[in-house]
Image (cartoon, rainbow, N blue to C red):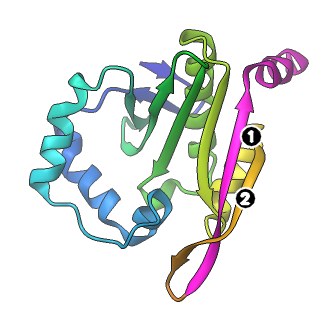
């Protein structure tokens, strides 16, 4: 378990399955996680995802839990790791709407970043975000991610085109930032 100021990252448990399914089938969450045509995930598919967690090897999936209440509110993950080049790709979602925009996602992201740089010895963290997800972009910028590239009007959603934004954070920049605040 990895602990921040407001949340902790822990392993998913079987008791998280139903609520996680509700979170990722929420159109607001699903739209932030993938630009694909929305299609609901079934309970059977979610159970298969959970059962495969231990066999995933170099990926890490964490449940986000509020420290005080022990409430499960979302998830974050290291989706890919390129060990040769020291690059990890990540993702995050806050499923419980009561906890959005209040710093819980930023706290979870900071824990995940620290884990990746200090425990895994990775050199760079990357992510993809869509221009319509302004709250996520603000969160990533608060965590010192930089925009590294923009694919203009790459994503079609709800009758409009949006940009696909690539963001990254280097280990050296992270270490500089945490040492300057110490």
Taking the image as shown, residue 90 lies to the left or right of residue 14, namely right
Residue plotted at (53% across, 78% down):
156
Disc 2 crowd, CA 10 A, few/some/many (<14, 14-19, 20+): some
Q: Which residue is mark 1?
A: 145
Label 2 or label 1, whichever comes before in sequence order: 1
Q: Are marks 2 and 1 in contact (CB under 8 Å)?
A: no
Q: Which residue is mark 2?
A: 150
Mark 1 secondary-structure assignment: loop
Quadrant, the C terminus: top right
Vertical placement of residue 69 versus 74, above or below? above
- Residue extent of the magenta highlight: 160-182
* Circle nearer the viewer, 2 or 1: 2
Q: Position of residue 54 (x, y in %)?
A: 22, 23
Residue plotted at (13% across, 44% down):
47
Q: Can residue 135 be seen here? A: yes
Quadrant, the N terminus: top left
Disc 1 crowd, CA 10 A, few/some/many (<14, 14-19, 20+): many
Indicate whether residue 22 is drawn in magenta: no
């Amino acid at each position: 378990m990895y602990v921040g100021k407001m949340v902790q990252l822990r392993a998913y448990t079987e008791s998280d399955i139903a609520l996680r399914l509700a979170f990722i089938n929420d159109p607001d969450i699903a739209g932030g996680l993938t630009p694909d045509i929305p299609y609901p995930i079934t309970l059977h598919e979610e159970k298969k995802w959970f059962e495969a967690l231990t066999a995933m090897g170099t990926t890490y999936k964490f449940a986000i839990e509020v420290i005080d209440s022990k409430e499960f509110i979302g998830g974050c993950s290291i989706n890919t790791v390129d060990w040769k080049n020291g690059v990890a790709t990540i993702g995050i979602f806050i499923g419980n709407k009561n906890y959005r925009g209040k710093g819980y996602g930023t706290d979870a992201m900071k824990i995940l970043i620290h884990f990746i740089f200090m425990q895994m010895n990775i050199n760079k963290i990357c992510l993809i975000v869509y221009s319509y997800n302004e709250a996520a972009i603000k969160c990533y910028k608060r965590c010192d991610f930089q925009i590294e590239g923009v694919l203009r009007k790459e994503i079609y959603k709800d009758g409009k085109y949006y940009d696909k934004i690539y963001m990254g954070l280097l280990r050296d920049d992270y270490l500089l930032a945490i040492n300057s605040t110490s």
